[in-house]
């Protein structure tokens, strides 16, 4: 059994069916591994969920780093690339960004380790956005980054409930508008 395969399959299960369906028995059946073998690594579903979300966060961080190093894209394209990926995932009935939100709802105690993972993910997303806005020379980059992150979180929250592709497009266009207004402000067009 490869750990990454189990975590990938668990993420797939979570993205398609939600947290309420997560059990070690379901995952054991999905990956065709005896339940007792899974329990050696993950004693319960909460441990598997935590490890899966941590792994998911690592995957997102790798994607961000690769995007940051891609010299063929401009900073605005890098900022909006998340919506392209989100669109592709939703078309496959996968809702990856919603997992952190759903997990925090499922485990509401703010001191739960899952909340720390979610907070780290939010911080990394904000830092990514802020660094690209600063690279663009955006006026009040911190405020624009907060606006961009609020749009993304709103989109992910709505996807958690509605699961409609149109919400990704609306969020992308709104983020694009915020970037355009920031550019206009930066060049004095709004003063």
Image (cartoon, rainbow, N blue to C red):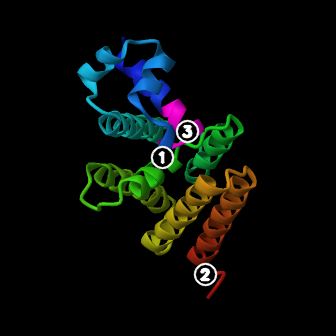
Between discs 3 and 1, the one toward the N terminus: 3
Residue topped by disc 3? 15
Cα gap from disc 2 to disc 1, whole angstroms? 40 Å
x, y percentage for residue 123?
36, 57
Q: Secondary structure at mark 2?
A: loop
x, y percentage for residue 16?
59, 37
Q: Are marks 3 and 1 in contact (CB under 8 Å)?
A: yes
Q: Residue at x 48, y 33 (%)?
A: 11
User: Which circle marks residue 126 in the picture?
Assistant: none
Q: Is residue 63 above or below residue 130?
A: above
Between 56 and 172, the residue placed more toward the observer is: 56
Residue topped by disc 1? 99
> Magenta residues?
11-19
Query: Tag 2: Cα neighbours inside 10 Å, few (<14), some, or many (≥20)?
Result: few
Between 158 and 24, the residue placed more toward the observer is: 24
Between discs 2 and 1, the one toward the N terminus: 1
Q: Residue at x 72, y 55 (%)?
A: 169
Inspect this view and state whether residue 146 appears: yes
Q: Residue at x 48, y 18 (%)?
A: 29
Between 183 and 5, the residue placed more toward the observer is: 5
Q: Quadrant of the C terminus?
A: bottom right
Q: Secondary structure at mark 3?
A: helix
x, y percentage for residue 43?
26, 29
Between 3 and 137, the residue placed more toward the observer is: 3
Q: Secondary structure at mark 1?
A: helix
Give the main secondary structure, helix, strand or loop, of the magenta stretch.
helix
């Amino acid at each position: 059994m490869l750990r990454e395969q189990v975590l990938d399959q668990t993420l797939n299960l979570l993205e398609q069916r939600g947290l309420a369906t997560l059990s070690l028995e379901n995952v054991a059946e999905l990956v065709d591994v005896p339940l007792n073998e899974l329990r050696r690594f993950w004693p319960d579903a909460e441990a598997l969920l935590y490890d899966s979300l941590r792994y998911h966060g690592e995957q997102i961080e790798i994607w961000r780093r690769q995007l940051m190093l891609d010299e063929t894209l401009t900073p605005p394209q890098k900022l909006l690339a998340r919506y392209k990926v989100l669109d592709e995932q939703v078309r496959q009935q996968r809702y990856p960004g919603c997992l952190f939100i759903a997990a925090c709802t499922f485990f509401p105690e703010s001191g739960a380790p899952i909340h720390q993972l979610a907070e780290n993910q939010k911080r990394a997303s904000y830092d990514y956005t802020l660094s690209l806005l600063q690279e663009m020379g955006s006026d009040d980059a911190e405020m624009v980054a907060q606006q961009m992150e609020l749009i993304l979180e709103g989109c992910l929250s709505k996807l958690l409930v509605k699961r409609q592709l149109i919400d990704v497009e609306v969020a992308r266009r709104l983020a694009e508008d915020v970037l355009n207004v920031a550019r206009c402000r930066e060049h004095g067009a709004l003063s």
